[in-house]
């Protein structure tokens, strides 16, 4: 038994937030969306949905546009950030299409009103969707410039009473140094919020970590590239790092 499953391998989670970066949707391409990759991730989400777990999702926008990049090239920062938020809406719609193609009911819920393409964010309505087992994909970040989708995921996870944030990455947890560059990097099984902040471990940005810490919301960092990885971790298998108090 691990703290993600009981003696029978049944998950202990009822409602979770899955945060993935926009780049996770690129596959091996250099920009934008790679539909087969989006579908692969949608299958991972469906397998967890099939376990009866209620799922919230936040997808970044870095595969299309990041505000900081735009402002580094001379664009006004808040405008660039709004462009980044709009990029996340495209990713959310792509994921909605892939999930619904697999028969999973979803709602895209946007922090910036655009009623023709997504529902506006109304907390109680979003909770109701989750209770009806619809996957809620929260788009447009927090709706505010100067934030990231990591913070948006943490904010919505708190508002939706999620039991944890699952942060899908390219590696199976948090390492003391970049495991892609350093063969001797070691993975933490657990690490505290304060260590993540002090050692700048790069799990999520500092505001997101502080918001998770202040609300005792665990962050589980796992590999999204591992087939069956998301479901496996919920069933108590596989490797991951748990960030907690
Ligand atoms: N963004 C923002 N406010 C938010 C969330 C996102 O301004 O609440 C903008 C910001 O410019 C960011 C971009 O949207 O660079 C894309 O989000 P993020 O960088 O978090 O995407 P990821 O790196 O996860 O793909």
Image (tube, grey):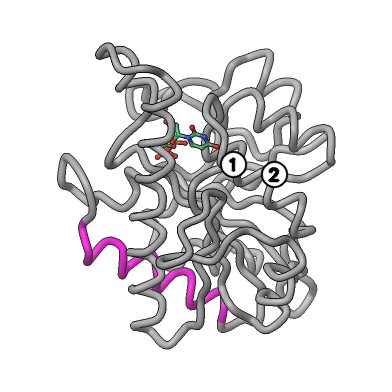
Q: Which residue is mark 1?
A: 142
208 to 6, vertically: above or below: above
The reply to whether residue 175 is visible in this rendering is no
As helix, strand or loop, the secondary structure at mark 1 comes to: loop
For the N terminus, the quadrant is bottom right
Q: Earlier in the sequence, mark 2 or mark 1?
A: 1
Question: Which residue is located at x 23 percent, y 54 percent?
Answer: 33
Name the chief secondary structure element in magenta: helix
How packed is label 1: few (under 14 Cα within 10 Å), some, or many (20 or more)?
A: many
- For label 1, being within 8 Å of ligand 1 is answered yes
Q: Position of residue 15 (x, y in %)?
A: 71, 67
208 to 164, vertically: above or below: above
Question: Which residue is located at x 48 percent, y 77 percent?
Answer: 46
Q: Quadrant of residue 192?
A: top right
Q: Position of residue 59 (x, y in %)?
A: 45, 51
Q: Which residue is mark 2?
A: 155
60 or 53: nearer the eye?
A: 60
How packed is label 2: few (under 14 Cα within 10 Å), some, or many (20 or more)?
A: some
132 or 11: nearer the eye?
A: 132
Does residue 174 appear to the left or right of 15 in the view shown?
A: left
Which segment did they paint magenta? 34-49
22 to 106, vertically: above or below: above
Dots 2 and 1: beta carbons under 8 Å?
A: yes
As drawn, the residue found furthest toward the bottom would be 103
Does residue 98 appear to the left or right of 210 in the view shown?
A: left
């Amino acid at each position: 038994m691990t703290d993600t499953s009981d003696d029978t391998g049944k998950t202990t989670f009822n409602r979770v937030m899955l945060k993935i970066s926009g780049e996770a949707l690129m596959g091996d391409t250099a920009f934008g969306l790679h539909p087969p990759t989006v579908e692969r991730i949608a299958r991972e989400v469906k397998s967890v949905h099939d376990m009866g777990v209620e799922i919230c999702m936040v997808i970044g926008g870095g595969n299309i546009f990041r505000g900081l990049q735009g402002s580094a090239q001379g664009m006004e920062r808040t405008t660039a950030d709004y462009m980044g938020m709009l990029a996340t809406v495209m990713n959310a719609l792509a994921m909605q299409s892939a999930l619904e193609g697999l028969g999973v009911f979803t709602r895209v819920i946007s922090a910036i009103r655009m009623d023709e393409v997504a529902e506006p964010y109304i907390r109680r309505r979003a909770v109701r969707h989750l209770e009806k087992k619809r996957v809620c994909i929260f788009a447009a970040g927090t709706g505010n410039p100067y934030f990231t989708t990591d913070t948006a995921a943490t904010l919505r996870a708190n508002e939706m009473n999620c039991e944890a944030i699952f942060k899908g990455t390219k590696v199976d947890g948090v390492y003391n140094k970049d495991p892609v560059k350093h063969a001797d990097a070691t993975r933490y099984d657990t690490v505290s919020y304060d260590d993540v902040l002090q050692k700048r471990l790069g799990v999520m940005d500092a505001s997101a970590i502080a918001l998770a810490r202040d609300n005792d919301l665990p962050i589980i960092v796992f590999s999204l590239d591992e087939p069956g990885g998301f479901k496996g971790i919920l069933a108590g298998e596989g490797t991951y790092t748990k960030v907690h108090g």
